[in-house]
Structures are given as structure tokens and as C-alpha cells.
Amino acid sequence: MKTFNPIGTGQLGKLAVFLCVALGLVSQLQAQLRVGAAVIDVTPEQLPVLVNGHMTSRSIDQITTRVNARALVLDDGSERIAMVVVDSCMMPRHLIDEAKQLASTRTRLRPDRIMISATHTHTAPSAAGALGTEPDPNYVPFLRQKLADAIVAAEARLEPARAGWGSGQAAQFTALRRWVRRPDRIATDPFGNATVRANMHAARNPDDAIGPTGPEDPELSMIAFQAIDGRPIAVLVNFSMHYFGDKGISADYFGLFCDGFEKYLSAEGEDSQGSPVAMMSHGCSGDIWRRDYMTPQPEADGTIHQYAGGLLSVATEIYDQIEYQPSADLAMLEARLPMRYRVPSAERLHWARQVVAEMGDRLPQTQPEIYAREQIFLHQMQSTEVVVQAMRIGDIAITTTPNETYALTGLKLKLQSPLEKTMVIELANGGDGYIPPPEQHTLGGYNTWAARSAGLEVTAEPRIVAANLRLLEQVCSRPRRRFVQTTGPVSQAILDARPLAYWRLSEMSARPAHDVSGNGISAEYEPGVLFFLDGPPEKLFSRVGEPNRCAHFAGGRLKSRPPNLGQDFTIVLSFWNGMPTDARDVTGWLFSRDHAYTLTGAGIHLGLSGKAATPGRLILQLGDREPLIGKTAIDRWSWAQAALVRSADTVRVYLAGSQTAEITAHLDVDEEFGNVADCFFGGRSDNQSNWEGKLDEIAVFDRAFTAKELRTLQR
């Protein structure tokens, strides 16, 4: 505490100054952040124990690593909150609610000021029923008690503290595991229907797959707490990677990471208050794993210890750069949302009952048996309630989902949060399964099959995002931010050229594509389009360090009717092909101007050639004419930019980087190719051989560009 030397000669003046200082000190003491942290072992005492995280039931009688509940309690004098991260695959809301209620009777914490989340290790005792596994009846009451014990222990260690934020990129440790399958390689779901256009690990065989279904979130973020003397108290880390995989009862990489971080923190000092605590919370990882299928590599690409150690190296570098704030006030709010389950139809329920009856008393062993039993559970349950929360620690925000949430959902929350420093913790306050963004349901796959592991209504994801953003606005006392894609040199050159319409395709959901030209020309996405993936190089189209976002087309198209678009026009777009170029006659159509649902003599169509011609080149089709093929081969899974220019007597097609046209078609004066209102991007007017891959930066100009003018847009 600073010493005070009164200034002034009069006793009254000295008294007045003393009172002012005393009141100030009281105010500071009231606003002082206090933090306590604790680790409680939750390893089962009775073995064997049921373990979930797999399709069928299994039990384990060996312990590879201990599993723990790590707790953090914060107090600013007027608000007290607790956060617990548990080495568990997932925990049901009723178990967590009971643990919160129990903790509230033993502490000064309200149940709605407690957050409890799972790390999602797939080698922890089963606390929730999912697919073929039920909760372990001996472990659940044991865990309930231990969760409360962890909160009690953390509260007992409250001491004055400071908080700081750190963030960095760990892209080499995370990647998309859910990929789009080729349209000619659709797989069958457990109900016997060919619906699987996307699935986890579909790219194990690259020939089967088109591309990832969404973006990654490589951010590794952390909130660190230190005592007033600089001694570390705790660090809460957040990262999006599903799990590594281990044998026996194990905390997976989450536990190894925390153990290593705690050793690192302990080197800075500990005292009678106890050792520093490291907590690894699960970021939005429903469609995330560690293997990057864009880079072919062997399945065995390192051990769990190497993975945890590499991630720890990134984390400690971030930690060492953290600056701490002298004070931080707290705020926390919770909302409970009613949710419907996707219950089976009468026909599916009848099938399910027949399958389960044939099983008798045994547990399910096949996918059809597992999902038949799940239909009966959903029919019995009908609806539920999910919990979402938002917290603020000074200028840092945290929000939660009770689900296995896609990386895109986490980015929606982070990029729209009122505070730039925002962490999203999933599988918190419940274990309500996957919540794919609505557009993902169109493509099917395991993450969408109705079950307790993925049974919430199709609108669950946008509803949870909306509720979280409202809570964040309230705890932060400011409005949400609006994401706007920044511009780079090429996107600025396109804007400077005054396009009739310019769609950058940086939407996070299926709302109309935003025309950044200022002309407000509408473009609508069809089902079969995915959003917010990594687009063309950021150095060309966005600010360095910010990914340029794009859309992935998987059967759907973007439709528009640009007004006043006449016979002379220019189309510029960036494209990324996901199809093997020898898979079908035309690899895919990029742009089409013709009447909907048909081909006419007036149509003009630009695409990528397939096995019917020299594959992998640009292809131009004018009405009923024979298609024309370009000269340059375009690699699969790489970005390119094309321009189509229609003038009175020619149609020319260019590739960026080339001074000459790839294709030139000469027209008679009376030929009106492309003089139709409907424009389609990502497919042809008749929906044949639609584009399978990414599109971005689509610009429409109401004039024919010269080759020299095009060069300013193609770098």
C-alpha cells in the first residue's frame, strides 16, 4: 500500500484529505479481483468402469493417466463466479445441475454463477448415455460429489489477483475432419438411405472427397491469473481440437497439456496457497481433428506426448507475453432455452421398434441397431432444455455451448462478440450432442444422424448463437460487433473498377450474399452451399493476417438477376476445384447465364472440362455450339481466377496471369448469347454437373473489359 503524507496546514484540511484517501482505498478493496483454483482427482475408485465416446459399449479396467476436475473461482467483491473443467467425454445437464446445487450449499456461489464443462476425452468414465453406452451407475454419484468438492476447494483459496489475456495461432495442431464426398460417391446412413454427402474423415481416401465442409479455428487463447506479488495462480486455456486418442482411462492430450503447463507455472513459484492450476477447456471442435487431409501424411503422425508437448510450446510462448490488468470486474448471465428433438416419423419409429425387439435384452452392436434404439429414446424424450452462459472478466468475455459445436459456430461468436478478447467453451453445462449449422444438415453424415448424440432441432445452432450474443451484449454493456471482410489490393482494384455487383461470399450463414459494390443487387444461395471457408490468398483480397473467406459449393448455386445487365458484360471470379478432373464428362460449371431449369440457344456457360475433353481446362459453351476448351491445366485443390468477357462480336475467357485469352469465340452480329436475365454461379442453369468446390470474389460488370483492363484485376 502506498504511504500518504497529508498536504496542508489545517487539521480540517488534513482530515478531509485523509477521508478522501480512505474512501478511495475502500473502493479499491471492494473492486479487488480475488481468484482461487484447485484440482480434484476424479479417477474412478471402482474398476472396471464404462467408457463412452465409441459407437458400442465398452468397459476399461486400466488407468493410463489420472482424470481430474480443475476449478476456478473469481470474486470482485460484488459478483462471484466459478468455472470447472472436467476430464470427461460429456456430462448431462441434470448431473451438472445437481453438482451446482450441491456446491451452492457449501459455498457462497449461486448455481447460475457456475460453469462446468467437459474436455471431451474419449477415454474417461461414462457420465452420459450416448449411442451404445449408458452412464456408469457407480461413477455418476462419485463424480457429482467431486465436482462440488472442486468448487469448494477453489473458493477456499481465494486471494487478491490480476488477470491477463493471451492469444496465438496453433494451426499445425488442428484441421477439419468433416469433408464433402463426391456426388457420385454418396454413402448410406444407418437407416438404409443414400444421404451421406459429407462425413467425418471422408478424405482418408482423397479420391472420394471434394473438400472440407467448414473453416478451422486455429486460435489458442488463454486467461491467466497471478497473485499481486506476481506468483501464478491459474491459467484457463481454450483450443479447438476434438481429442487425440489414448488407451485405458486417460485424460488424453488435455491432461498431459495441463500437467506440463502446471510444471511450467510452478517453476515461477508456489507457496502455502498451493500449486498453480492449468485448465484446458474444449473449444468448438465438433468438425475438428488433428490430421490435415489437405497434406497427405501417414496415419501415425506422432504420439500423444509429442502432440501435447508441441501445443504446450505454443501456449507457453503466448503465456510469457501476457500483460496483466490491475483490476477486473465480473459479470455473468445464464439462459435456459427450450429445444425440440428431431423425433422419428411413424414409419421410422415402427422400423426402430422392430429392430430393438429383435435385439432382445442385449446392447446394440451394429449401426442400424444403435440408431434404431436412439429413435425410441428421442420419441420418448421429445424435447429438452439447454443452458447457455456469458461471462465477463474485465475486458475479456467467455461464452458457452452445451454441445459439440462446429468451428464455424465458435467463429460466429468470437467475431461478433462485443469484446475482441472472447473465448468459447463447448460441452459446458450439458452434453446435448452435435449442433451443425443448418446448411450442414443438407449434406447428412454422422454429425447429423438423429440420436441423443445429435438430436436437437435443425435450428439449434442459430438459436444458441443468438442467445449467446444477447447474453454477451448484456454482460459487456455494449452491442455486438459486425464482421466485415477487409480488402486487399485485388479486391480494392475490383471496387475501383465500379462493378455492377460484387459478392465477396464472406457470409457465415445462408442469408443473401452481400453486394459490396453499393448497388444492392440481390443474390441467393441454394441449399448445398457451405460458408466461411478459407478463400484465395489473403495478400490479394484481405488484410494480411486475416483469412479471406469464401463459400464451398456442394450441389447448390448462387442465383441472381442483375438489372440492366445487357449483351456486353464481364464476369470475374476466383475458383477452387475439389473434383478429380477425370471423374465426369464436365468437372463442373462455374457460371451460367440462361433461363432457369433448361439450356437454350441463348445460353452462355463457363466451367472446367472433364473426361469428355482434355480434362482440367476452362470450358466455354455457347448455346448449342460445341464446347471450346482452354489451353492451361488447372490443378485440383488450388485457387485460380477466371474472367469471361462478352462483347458484341466475341466471347473471351482469361486466366489470371496470362496475357492472352484461354478461349476466344467469334460471334455473328445477330447472335445474342448470354442476353438472359438469370445468372447462376456454382452451377449451370439446368443443374447439371454443378460446381464441386469453392468460389469467391464474384464481380459482375455491365461492360466488356479489354485485356489491359483485366490485368488490373488479375494479379
Image (cartoon, grey):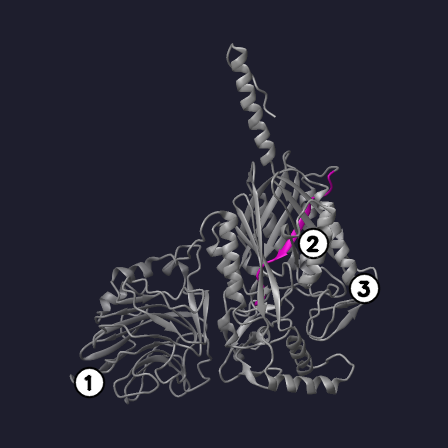
Magenta segment, which residues? 273-288
**For discs 1 and 2, the disc positioned in front in the rendered view:** 2
- 594 in magenta: no
Residue at disc 1, secondary structure: loop
Please say whether residue 212 is visible from this viewpoint: no
**For discs 3 and 1, the disc positioned in front in the rendered view:** 3
Q: Name the disc covering residue 671, or none.
A: 1
Dot 2 crowding, Cα within 10 Å, few <14, some 14–19, many 20+: many
Tell me if residue 699 comes above or below residue 28 in the rendering.
below
Q: Which amino acid lies under the numbered mark 2 shown in the image of this protein?
A: Lys
Relative to the observer, which residue lies in front, 552 or 395?
395
Tell me if residue 590 comes above or below residue 259 in the rendering.
below
Direction from residue 536 to residue 382 in the image, left or right: right
Task: Return the disc, 2 or 3, that comes first in the chain's sequence.
Answer: 2
For the C terminus, the image quarter is: bottom left
Residue occupied by mark 3: 138
Relative to the observer, which residue lies in front, 545 or 122?
122
Q: Name the disc covering residue 222, or none.
A: none
Q: Position of residue 657 (x, y in %)?
A: 32, 68
The CA distance from mark 2 to mark 3 is 20 Å
Relative to the observer, which residue lies in front, 232 or 451?
451
In the picture as drawn, the residue positioned furthest to the right comes out as 46
Please say whether residue 116 is visible from this viewpoint: yes
Q: Quadrant of residue 377?
A: bottom right
Task: Return the disc, 1 or 2, that comes first in the chain's sequence.
Answer: 2
In the picture as drawn, the residue positioned furthest to the top comes out as 9
Residue at disc 3, secondary structure: loop
Q: Name the disc covering residue 100, or none.
A: 2
Which residue lies at the image location 57% right of the left edge and 85% below the top edge?
Answer: 193
Dot 3 crowding, Cα within 10 Å, few <14, some 14–19, many 20+: some
Task: Return the disc, 3 or 1, that comes first in the chain's sequence.
Answer: 3
**For discs 2 and 3, the disc positioned in front in the rendered view:** 2
